[in-house]
Image: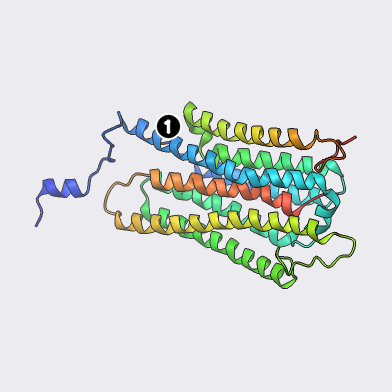
Amino acid sequence: MTTHQEAIEHHPDELELGHQFEDIEQQTEAYTVGMWVFLVTEIMFFGGLFAAYIVYRALYPEIWYAAHEKLDKVLGGVNTAVLLTSSFTMALAVRSAMLNRWKAQVSYLLATMAFAITFLVIKYFEYKEKFEHHLFPGPNFNFGDPGVPNDKAQMFFNLYFAMTGLHGAHVLIGVIVMIALVIRTINMRNQRQDFIPVELAGLYWHFVDIVWIFLFPLLYLIGR
Amino acid sequence: MQMHIVPVRVYFIVYVLLMILLFVTYWVATMHLGRWNTVVAMLVAMVKTSLVALFFMHLYYSGRLTHVWAAVGFLFLVIMFGLTMNDYITREPSAPGLSVPE
């Protein structure tokens, strides 16, 4: 038996405002800007690998062309399409959160997760194929082309695994965040929810998508 | 940033454009344009990034402070690439590193 007053305290209609903020607008902007600051550090995190990529590709353009031919362009393209689609569903999940439609929000988050997991499964098969062909950097690395120096071809695969591996880890973290969001949304279905947690997860997810937008042409589509 | 509800139509148009640009990237890569291949691929990737950042990430509807931070991300990346390549492309041909392109 709860009084009406207690019910309001447990299920507020209003969004909660942190006492350090003037109003909801300021709070929302502070959260959003904070996430962007984090994304800047992420840009620099990946940027270091991209810088290494530029240097080595400029040093050995023809070896990089030969090495990239071992990658499956079609799988890379399909994976790009999968991630772009997941970004689209994530944007719709954020929109549902803003409109306070929790069922639609959960559905879109689950769809985004399904695409993310599809991406990781395709990546797993790509990696597996590289391992089987001795293309994983290490003592067993063997490019198998006498015209291409082994050590320089290995540098390409070093960067390939470092970049796609770091990106894949980010996709996996994204999935974990989305699972947490789904649980949270279902638990709080009877009250007005702030859309900010989903918005910030969305910002992160679109960033991960952007990284892949660059990785795909740089690794899979080296021109001649 | 106020809560800005973007119509589903806008998201869908952006999504279709992204998919078209993906096919453009793939199609251009099958041609042999030499150095221009990379240039075109990077330009298309930048257009795709702009679309994602402006509409999916709501930059188009965000306040100025958010714009500043988005720009800072890009700016510092350019500084890092610029200074790194400043070293490599100006090395003597005899030294390890890049030789100066003709």
Task: Tell me which corner region of the image, top left, top right, bottom left or bottom right, holds residue A147.
Answer: bottom right
Looking at the image, residue A71 sits to the left or right of residue A11; the answer is right
B100 vs A72, nearest the viewer: B100
A51 shown above or below B70? below
| Tally of numbered discs | 1
Residue at image coords 45%, 58% = A176
Which chain does tag 1 point to? B
Residue A103 picture quarter:
bottom left
Question: Which amino acid does the dot numbered 1 rest on?
Answer: Met
Between A10 and A64, the residue placed more toward the observer is A64
Question: Label 1 belongs to which residue?
Answer: B1
**Regarding mark 1 in the picture, which secondary structure is present there?**
loop
Residue A76 at x, y = what percent?
A: 69, 58
Point out the residue furthest to the front here: B95
Nearest to the observer: residue A221 or residue B13:
A221
* Residue at figure coordinates x 36%, y 47% from the top left: A100
x and y percent of residue A198 in the render? Answer: 42, 48
Q: Extreme bottom residue here? A: A132
In the rendered view, tell whether residue A53 sits above or below residue A180. above
Residue A130 location (% of width, % of height): 71, 67
The x, y position of residue A180, in whole percent, is 39, 57
- Residue A95 shows in the view: no
Position of A100 compared to A63: left or right? left
> Residue A219, can we see it?
yes
Which picture quadrant has residue A80?
A: bottom right
Q: Residue at x 54, y 54 (%)?
A: A170
Q: Residues within 10 Å of mark 1 (few under 14, many from 20)?
A: many
Model colouring: rainbow
